[in-house]
Image: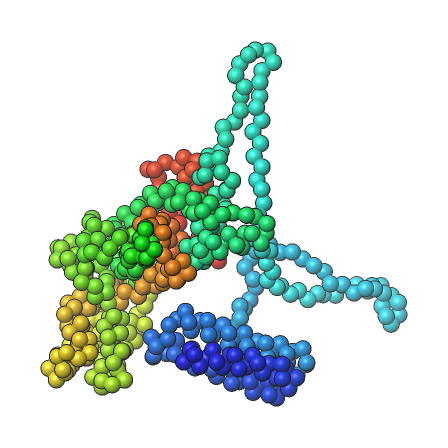
């Protein structure tokens, strides 16, 4: 489908010149491209949402939207506008109030009436706002520290101490270091690409210099990530997941596979007051003892996928595992085209998700009551159906494998029925994994285990900022400044993203 889409885009781009002068043909082309976009969106957001890779789909949609807009621009220029233009996905209403307003007045040349020569007076005005941008601008902060001496005696000169810096004796301000961190870990720009961007403004910074800044910032920020993880472990419910983190193996020219473990909290689906947060921890391997080490003091419900490494945690009396229905559904989805029983299982699971959609945001007791009254009978019926289907299926087939995956985790899959604070799946933490995957795709690998740890530390704080709608650039700049100025280690609570910065609009 994606290959076909790219072909469609290439063909329509070749035809644009001919289409711009022909209004009827252009309108037809817009309708055709709009239909292609609608088809992609059905694949992305409809029942078959797992068919296409979201990142590849986004790229294809960008090209198609741009293609439609180019045809529309030709029509606008020729005055031959379509009769019923497509509803555009555009921002509505006023632009954010916190943005600087730069006013320009477009006035008539003469204030004299063209009819009688009398003076014109203002009877109203039209005001239009457009979003403008000033590209990133570097500036140089010059710090002067006067030295004072006494003429009456030989006392030592007096001078204010130099402000503390992340890079002692170095050139970057904390705001610039924050900018580099956000570029690398939030916008997924490797350091060499950032160096290329800066060079266009005449600022030459070597990639190794930027890497030095990242490492120093990570050292200052590590206590905050550790404090964040400790705060998460005091929660009664957490989500856990892991993803690969390719790491360069010194001397071999190859990479080995490390792991980034994610531990997340998000109580918003049931109206909880604890702020959402995620903490990542790097480990050089995927051994089962890793999550046990990370969650040593945690007590409560841990929502996870089917990775066997979490089973050891489930044997603890302090931790109760809740498994993910999304992963169960995925196993049946992959074979639904050829297995009617898999299709039936998907229909039944979809009924559970429809109920969850209705009660999202409701109080825990209300969610539990609805689940006990409506979801529990559906779950019991689904189990009977799966057991019957398993008896009829080939023991080595994909259908039997998908059914056993569900039945072997049945107690954990039913956990959400008895607790309104537990989600039906672990999609919350899976969404927190996606930024790591994007960074991995752009940076390819971390240079060392220490680089993997830098990744975990800084990504934890940036993603927690994003979950709390806090600007990570502003938060990192202010937090690094406070840390280097001597903020006490006993007061790290004051630096958490949800307490130290106002939310963005």
Q: Give the quarter of the figure containing the N terminus.
A: bottom left
Q: Residue at x 54, y 81 (%)?
A: 12
* Left or right of 318 on screen, residue 86: right
Name the quadrant containing residue 413: bottom left
Q: Which of the two residues, 3 or 456, is positioned nearer the viewer here?
A: 3
Instruction: Provide residue 43's location: percent of width, then percent of height.
Output: 38, 79
Q: Which residue of the protein is positioned furthest toward the left in this rendering?
A: 391
Instruction: Provide residue 312's location: percent of width, then percent of height.
Output: 15, 57
Q: Residue at x 57, y 76 (%)?
A: 69
**Total marks placed:** 0
* Left or right of 352 on screen, residue 203: right
248 shown above or below 386: above
Q: Residue at x 56, y 29 (%)?
A: 145
Instruction: Provide residue 407's location: percent of width, then percent of height.
Output: 15, 72
**Figure colour scheme:** rainbow
Q: Residue at x 34, y 55 (%)?
A: 253
Name the quadrant containing residue 269: bottom left
Q: Which of the two residues, 335 or 319, is positioned nearer the viewer here?
A: 335
Q: Which of the two residues, 311 or 470, is positioned nearer the viewer here?
A: 311
């Amino acid at each position: 489908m994606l290959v076909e889409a790219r072909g469609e885009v290439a063909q329509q781009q070749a035809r644009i010149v001919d289409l711009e002068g022909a209004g009827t043909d252009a309108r037809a082309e817009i309708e055709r491209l709009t239909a292609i976009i609608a088809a992609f969106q059905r694949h992305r957001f409809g029942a078959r949402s797992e068919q296409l890779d979201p990142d590849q789909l986004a790229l294809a949609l960008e090209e198609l939207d741009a293609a439609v807009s180019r045809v529309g621009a030709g029509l606008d220029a020729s005055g031959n506008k379509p009769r019923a233009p497509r509803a555009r996905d555009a921002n509505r209403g006023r632009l954010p109030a916190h943005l600087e307003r730069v006013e320009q007045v477009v006035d008539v040349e003469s204030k004299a009436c063209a009819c009688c020569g009398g003076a014109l007076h203002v009877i109203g005005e039209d005001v239009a706002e457009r979003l403008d941008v000033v590209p990133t601008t570097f500036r140089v902060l010059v710090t002067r520290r006067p030295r004072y001496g006494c003429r009456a005696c030989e006392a030592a000169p007096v001078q204010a101490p130099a402000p503390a810096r992340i890079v002692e004796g170095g050139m970057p301000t904390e705001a610039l270091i924050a900018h580099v961190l956000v570029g690398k870990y939030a916008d997924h720009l490797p350091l060499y690409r950032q160096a290329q961007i800066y060079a266009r403004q005449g600022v030459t910074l070597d990639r190794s210099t930027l890497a030095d800044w990242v490492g120093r910032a990570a050292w200052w920020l590590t206590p905050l990530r550790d404090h964040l993880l400790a705060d998460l472990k005091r929660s009664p419910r957490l989500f856990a997941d892991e993803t690969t983190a390719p790491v360069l193996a010194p001397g071999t020219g190859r990479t080995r596979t490390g792991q980034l473990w994610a531990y997340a909290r998000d109580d918003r689906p049931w109206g909880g007051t604890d702020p959402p947060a995620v903490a990542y921890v790097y480990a050089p391997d995927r051994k089962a003892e890793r999550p046990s080490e990370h969650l040593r003091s945690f007590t409560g419900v841990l929502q996870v996928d089917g990775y066997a490494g979490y089973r050891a945690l489930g044997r603890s009396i302090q931790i109760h595992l809740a498994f993910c229905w999304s992963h169960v559904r995925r196993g049946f989805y992959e074979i639904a085209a050829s297995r009617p029983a898999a299709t039936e299982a998907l229909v039944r699971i979809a009924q559970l998700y429809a109920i969850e959609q209705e009660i999202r945001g409701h109080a825990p007791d209300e969610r539990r009551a609805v689940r006990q009254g409506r979801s529990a009978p559906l779950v019991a019926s689904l189990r009977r159906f799966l057991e019957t289907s398993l008896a009829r299926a080939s023991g080595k087939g994909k259908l039997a494998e998908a059914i056993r995956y569900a039945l072997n985790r049945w107690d954990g899959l039913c956990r959400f029925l008895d607790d309104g604070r537990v989600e039906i799946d672990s999609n919350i933490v899976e969404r927190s994994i996606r930024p790591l995957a994007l960074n991995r795709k752009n940076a390819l690998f971390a240079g060392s285990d220490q680089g993997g740890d830098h990744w975990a530390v800084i990504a934890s704080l940036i993603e927690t900022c994003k979950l709390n709608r806090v600007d990570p650039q502003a938060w990192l700049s202010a937090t690094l400044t406070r840390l280097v100025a001597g903020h006490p280690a006993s007061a790290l609570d004051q630096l958490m993203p949800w307490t130290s910065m106002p939310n963005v609009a």
